[in-house]
Amino acid sequence: MGHRGRHREAGLQSDFTALWIGQTVSLFGDYIAYLTIPLFLKELSERAINFGLISAAESIPTLLFGFLGGVLLDRFRLKPVLVIGDLLRASAFLVLAAFATEEGFEVWMLLPFSFIVGSLAASFNAGLQSLLPALVPSRMLATANSRLSLSQQLAFLLGPVSGGLLVASLGFSAAFTFNALTFMVSAASFFFIRAPVERRIPSNGRFLIQVLEGWEYLWRDTRIRLTTLAGSLGNFVTGFIEAALVLIGARILGTDDPAQLGLFVVGMGIGGLIGAFSVAAVIRIIGIGKAFVAGMMLFGTGLFSMTFAGDLLTVAGILVGAFMGLVWVNVSMTTMRQLYTPEHLLGRVTATARALAWGTLPIGALFGTWMADRIGLLTIVRVGPVLIITFAVFLISTAVWNADTVEEPRRTEEQARTATPGSSKDV
């Protein structure tokens, strides 16, 4: 059997707990910044284009990193890379905190900050997903991913509110400093991972060839290819839904009341929490592939049916089910990729898959809003979910439907025989 999770067959113990605590704090900081950065920008400018530019500067690195950065993750030991990434993000927020109170601070200064933080986040997230299979036994990967997802959903609910309170009471500089501290906690958590985590590191070859190896493996494995395409489709639809959420809510409910529209987000958050609590059990009971397809069906059906609801409570309840399904999709997709990718390719495949999946968010937002002005808002809202449901039905006839975690040990032995020679402890 390969190195993956060999030292933690007993279950999720102290090493993962340290990692989980660090990421819970770090995610809380991420969602504080989710509100504080736009609020700070609003202090500098009211022009919508500036918000678009800052958002693009933060999201573009996911595309750029997916094409090239995965090779670097597979060439280096991941724990030092992740620690350095956290410390650099902390430094970036400390610099922003120092200059936030300066009179001469201008909008353009947020562009390099957003690009740097976005680049570090893209590399960190791909690296964390690549490290997890070396830290957690294969049969516990779904549970580990569900706990990280639970932390993300809690941060989504509590982080923006906390960020607003920090800004209101202490100012932007204090809020950015607090954000930096959360990344320092995350960096420190990696030093509590005591067990030697072994991970196969390939010998350095030609950079372009190693880039292509990640792409080729992603496309060759049916389950990883189809789930990545499904994720791209889901984010294409979600990009439009998120961009036009206020307009959609006002059209469905017939009101512009911010308090009522805010319950849209509450429904999403509650659904995400329920999904994070339940996904590990669902995968264990029906299998990881069926959990993925069921999640897509719930998400697509929920988004479609909410357009026919006439009252707030019904819409909020539908969104609970839809976003519960979305968490099932995300956790199942991440876990399948970790299970079915050889260790020496995991960084490249993870980064490439994330680039393909996340890259459709801005495209969906632009295309969906453009089409909504031409053929009607609710028409576009309904077409997207139908595409998701159709793709989910198609997956029933593919290898994704029967995917399960019991195949992993056999695949690991095959991968160990064919992997690039050379192994190194990631300490």
Image (tube, grey):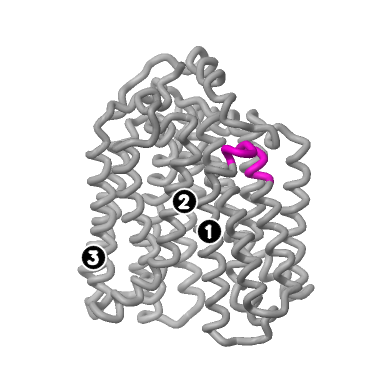
Q: At 56% from the left edge and 61% from the top edge, which residue is drawn?
A: 271
In the figure, 235 relative to 379: above or below? Answer: above
Circle 1/circle 2 CB separation < 8 Å: yes
Q: Is residue 10 left or right of residue 354?
A: left
Q: Which mark is residue 130?
A: none
Labels 3 and 1: the sequence-earlier one: 3
Pointer 1 local density, CA inside 10 Å: few below 14, some 14–19, many at least 20:
many
Does the CB distance between marks 3 and 2 fall below 8 Å?
Answer: no
Q: Image point 56% across, 68% down: which residue? A: 267
Residue under the point 59% across and 24% down? 407
Q: Residue at x 33, y 36 (%)?
A: 13
| Vertical arrangement, residue 331 with respect to residue 418, above or below | below
**Residue 404 horizontal/vertical position (percent):** 61, 31
Asked if residue 250 is positioned above or below residue 407 in the image, the reply reads below
- What residue sits right under mark 1 in the picture? 272
Q: Amino acid at mark 1?
A: Gly
Q: Which residue is mark 2?
A: 149
Q: Earlier in the sequence, mark 3 or mark 2?
A: 2
Per the image, the residue denoted by label 3 is 177
Q: Secondary structure at mark 1?
A: helix
Please state the horizontal and vertical placement of residue 172, each as a whole percent of the image. 28, 74
Q: Mark 3 belongs to which amino acid? A: Thr
CA separation in Å, label 3 and label 1? 28 Å
Q: How many marks?
A: 3
Question: Percent from the top left, x then y, of residue 12?
Answer: 38, 36
Asked whether 341 falls inside the magenta stretch, the response is no
Question: Taking the image as drawn, is residue 17 in sight?
Answer: yes
